[in-house]
Image (cartoon, coloured by chain):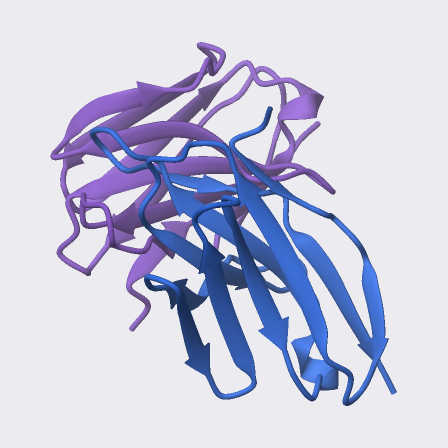
């Protein structure tokens, strides 16, 4: 069983659509993250939740809206996206702490048309 | 200055070669460091943690130089399957210890 599961794996949406990405972790972690990875670019941190509180919002446009209903689930709500938002969206989780590593889901490959 | 910097490469080496990557970090208070591997169109996966002055796992050796604020990854006897992007990660000190990623170094091992 994968420790961090993301759905859907692939998503194509129009600029006027509303969709949500889902992430679920089965590792008992208390911190969850959304990262964006565009083609040939480094991972960009979008949001961080620690103990269900948002602790980081890295200047992300308001068309991306995160939600963390509990420590095991993380959502990214999308609306009125732009073609440049097409990317691989990766969810990760870890135990909050200095020496702990992050575990990633397989990502959602998003294409905005 | 970026928090975590890596040479993007690509490093193009023959099978059996030894190759080394460096990564520099800007915050001298950082205490925890990792190397991840990312295959094309896949998620990053932990390769190894970097403890105190270094860590070795088979053909892979990671070292930390606190004075110069860099970590390195050495791969000996390269295999074709080592071809991937190697990401340097530093847990940012102060509060949430958010994993901060370098842009990655691309390695291509050819026959």
Of the chain colours in the picture, the one used for chain A is purple
Give the residue drawn at x 31%, y 46%. B31
Q: In which quarter of the image is residue A96?
A: top left
Q: Quadrant of residue B27?
A: top left
Q: Where is residue A31 in the image (x, y as percent from the top left)?
A: 21, 41
Of the chain colours in the picture, the one used for chain B is blue
Q: Position of residue A20 (x, y in %)?
A: 40, 32
Eyeballing the image, is A52 above or below B35? above
Which residue occupies the extreme front position in the image?
Answer: B67
Q: Which image quarter is the N terminus of chain A in? A: bottom left
Give the residue drawn at x 74%, y 48%. B8
A94 or A77: nearer the eye? A94
B74 or B81: nearer the eye? B74
Q: Where is residue B111 in the image (x, y as percent from the top left)?
A: 88, 87
Give the residue drawn at x 46%, y 37%. A35
The answer to whether residue A9 is visible is no
Task: Report whether A3 appears left or right of B68.
Answer: left
Q: Where is residue B30 in the image (x, y as percent from the top left)?
A: 35, 40
Give the residue drawn at x 45%, y 82%. B57
The answer to whether residue B39 is visible is yes
Eyeballing the image, is B57 above or below A10? below
A83 or A54: nearer the eye? A54
């Amino acid at each position: 069983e994968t420790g961090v599961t993301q759905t859907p794996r692939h998503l194509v949406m129009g600029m006027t659509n509303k969709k949500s990405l889902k992430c679920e972790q089965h590792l008992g972690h208390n911190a969850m993250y959304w990262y964006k990875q565009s083609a040939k670019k480094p991972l960009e941190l979008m949001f961080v939740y620690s103990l269900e509180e948002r602790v980081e919002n890295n200047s992300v446009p308001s068309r991306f809206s995160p939600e963390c209903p509990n420590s095991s689930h993380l959502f990214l709500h999308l609306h009125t996206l732009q073609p440049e938002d097409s990317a691989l969206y990766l969810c990760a989780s870890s135990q909050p702490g200095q020496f702990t590593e992050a575990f990633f889901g397989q990502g959602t490959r998003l294409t905005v048309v | 200055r970026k928090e975590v910097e890596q040479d993007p490469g690509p490093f193009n080496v023959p099978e059996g070669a030894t190759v080394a990557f460096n990564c520099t970090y800007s915050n001298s208070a950082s205490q925890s460091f990792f190397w991840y591997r990312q295959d094309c169109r896949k998620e990053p996966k932990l390769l190894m943690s970097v403890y105190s002055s270094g860590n070795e796992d088979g053909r892979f050796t990671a070292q930390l130089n606190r004075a110069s604020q860099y970590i390195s990854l050495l791969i000996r006897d390269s295999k074709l399957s080592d071809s991937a992007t190697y990401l340097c990660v530093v847990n940012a000190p102060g509060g949430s210890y958010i994993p901060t990623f370098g842009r990655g170094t691309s390695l291509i091992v050819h026959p």
